[in-house]
Image (cartoon, rainbow, N blue to C red):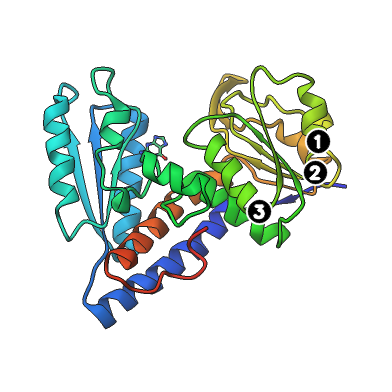
Amino acid sequence: MTADIIDGKAFAATIRDKVTGHVARLKDEHGITPGLAVVLVGEDPASQVYVRSKGKQTVEVGMNSYEHKLDPETSEADLLALIEQLNNDPAVHGILVQLPLPDHLDSDLVINSIDPAKDVDGFHISNVGLLGTGQKSMVPCTPLGCLMMLRDKLGNLSGMDAVVLGRSNIVGKPMAQLLLGDSCTVTIAHSRTKDLPEVVRRADIVVAAVGRPEMVPGDWIKPGATVIDVGINRIERDGKTKLVGDVDFPSVHAVAGAVTPVPGGVGPMTIACLLANTVTACCRANGLAEPEGLTA
Ligand code: GUN
């Protein structure tokens, strides 16, 4: 048996189409254009690429994009003042501060200064608490994208055994909360987990988010399981730079029921979900019905 390959690029395009439709309706029926502000501090090349891509896709779906590129030496006070200004700007429905921030800035303080209703990353402690208690929140984009792909592939996830590899605040922990919300039996595995291959072998759903290239081999995977690979790792092979995930794709593909590729799996879903979250935030801010199929 070989696994179905889940096409994240195509799925992300369907999400963007839905967002485009909602944005057009917000404009036509309510005269509102959703706006997303992205703040980048410094010149990290990978962050610059992400921010450019976010801005481009925001405009493509018909929303307003506000980019704030700040000097690497920007003081915490100046950054907090900008966030306060964006919090109070009615044209801005979503705010994203690109991480990582330079070392002299306190990321927790900065993230928690964003209005939780505009926190389209879902990183503010209020949103973390709301998600953990099953209340309406802004949901982090990468786990939201993974959940959408799992529901699309498997339908109802209730009762399934899910293993999340990795315990980060950005992916692992919120992913586990979302799977729990869909009534999976959830295990969060990490670097200190005992008998990791055995733990992973029990899972109907594996979400790998550890940032270690090709760490999960096919013989850890239960035949027919669905594997979501969040890893984006750059490696050198045969004299070339290559992008690989956290799972060893060829051996996992031979055993699993479905698997996401790298690139072209989870990656494209993250920005699509950021756009979806911005529309959701805009609808909530204006007391309008939330778009269907774009939230958790
Ligand atoms: N850096 C890497 N991924 C992300 C993300 O999802 N949000 C933000 N704000 N920064 C990131």
Q: What label does residue 141 carry, if any?
A: none
Residue bearing mark 1:
221
Give the foreground label among 3 and 2: 3
Disc 1/disc 3 C-alpha distance (Å) = 16 Å
Vertical side of 242 occupied by 159: above or below = below
Instruction: State left or right for residue 2 relative to residue 288.
Output: right
Vertical side of 270 occupied by 237: above or below = above
Q: Residue at x 68, y 24 (%)?
A: 215
Q: Nearer the viewer, residue 284 or 4?
A: 284
Q: Nearer the viewer, residue 289 or 236?
A: 289
Earlier residue among tags 1 and 2: 1
Taking the view exactly as shown, the residue that stands out farthest to the front is 133
Disc 3/disc 2 C-alpha distance (Å) = 14 Å
Earlier residue among tags 1 and 3: 3
Q: Residue at x 52, y 37 (%)?
A: 171
Q: Nearer the viewer, residue 158 or 9?
A: 158
Q: Position of residue 141 (x, y in %)?
A: 46, 47
Does dot 1 land on a helix, a strand or a loop?
Answer: loop
Give, as a three-letter code, the residue at label 2.
Answer: Ala
Taking the view exactly as shown, the residue that stands out farthest to the bottom is 29
* For the residues bearing labels 1 and 2, Cβ distance under 8 angstroms: yes
Q: Position of residue 220 (x, y in %)?
A: 81, 30
Instruction: State left or right for residue 22 relative to residue 226.
Output: left
Whether residue 81 is visible here, answered yes or no, is yes
Give, as a three-letter code, the residue at label 3.
Answer: Leu
Earlier residue among tags 3 and 2: 3
Residue bearing mark 3:
150
Disc 1/disc 2 C-alpha distance (Å) = 7 Å
Q: Residue at x 33, y 48 (%)?
A: 119
Give, as a three-letter code, the residue at label 1.
Answer: Ile
Q: Position of residue 188 (x, y in %)?
A: 65, 32
Residue bearing mark 2:
256
